Image (spheres, rainbow, N blue to C red):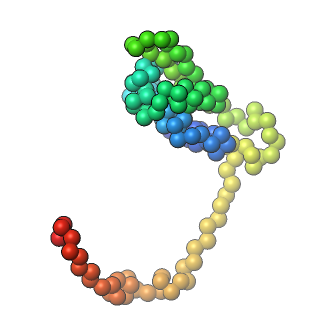
Amino acid sequence: MSYIDLINAFWLMDEQKEFTPNETRLYFFLLHLANRFYWKEEWLEYGDDKMQSAVGISAAVLRTARKNLKEAKLIDFVTGGNGHRVRTRYQIITPNLDPNLNSSHDPSLDPIHYSKIKIKTNNNSEFSKKSKNERFSKREYVASASDFD
């Protein structure tokens, strides 16, 4: 699965799971790390203190976010134990979006189900009938006493 496929799969899952901003930021930071290292390693090692700083969250929020991402089967992780230089190992898991494995039989609840949406535009509005010059000619010049003039 490509980088873009992982991103798209995440957003499909987000429609059902409604990930928090912290979970979203952590996941995308992990994708960024994997991409920065050219996807050469199956497991990424990153210190918790450094992760908290990079993502901008506390230790408790980090633990909760990665636990929820693991339950959603987006990542796996192994904590490195206690210590300042000990790193947690992360693995990005390819999500399984097979519609046959979905427990619901209602296709509208399927995470990869797309519906066609028709958007109507009103091209007969008074605004669209005016010429470009006429729309802008009625504007007035506004002078301000700003320091940036």
Residue 124 horizontal side relative to residue 16, left or right: left
Is 130 rendered above or below residue 70?
Answer: below
Label total for image: 0
The image position of residue 146, as x and y in percent, is: 21, 70
> Where is residue 147 drawn, in percent x and y?
18, 67
Q: Residue at x 48, y 37 (%)?
A: 25
Image height of 2 relative to 76, above or below = below
Residue found 54% across the figure and 16% down from its top? 78
The answer to whether residue 105 is left or right of residue 66 is right
* Res. 133 visible in picture: no
The residue lying toward the viewer, choosing from 128 and 88, is: 88
Q: Is residue 2 left or right of residue 16?
A: left
Residue sticking out furthest to the right: 105
Q: Nearer the viewer, residue 54 or 94?
A: 54
Q: Quadrant of residue 47?
A: top left
Quarter occupied by the N terminus:
top right
Quarter in which the C terminus is drawn: bottom left
Where does the image place residue 13, in percent across and percent down from the top left? 63, 39
Residue 102 position, x and y percent, is 76, 36
Q: Quadrant of residue 65?
A: top right
Q: Is residue 87 something one can see in this rendering?
A: yes
Quarter residue 46 falls in: top left
What residue is at 38 percent from the left and 84 percent from the top?
135
Question: Closer to the camera, 54 or 28?
Answer: 54
Residue positioned 61% across, 30% down in the render: 68
Q: Is residue 90 above or below residue 112?
A: above
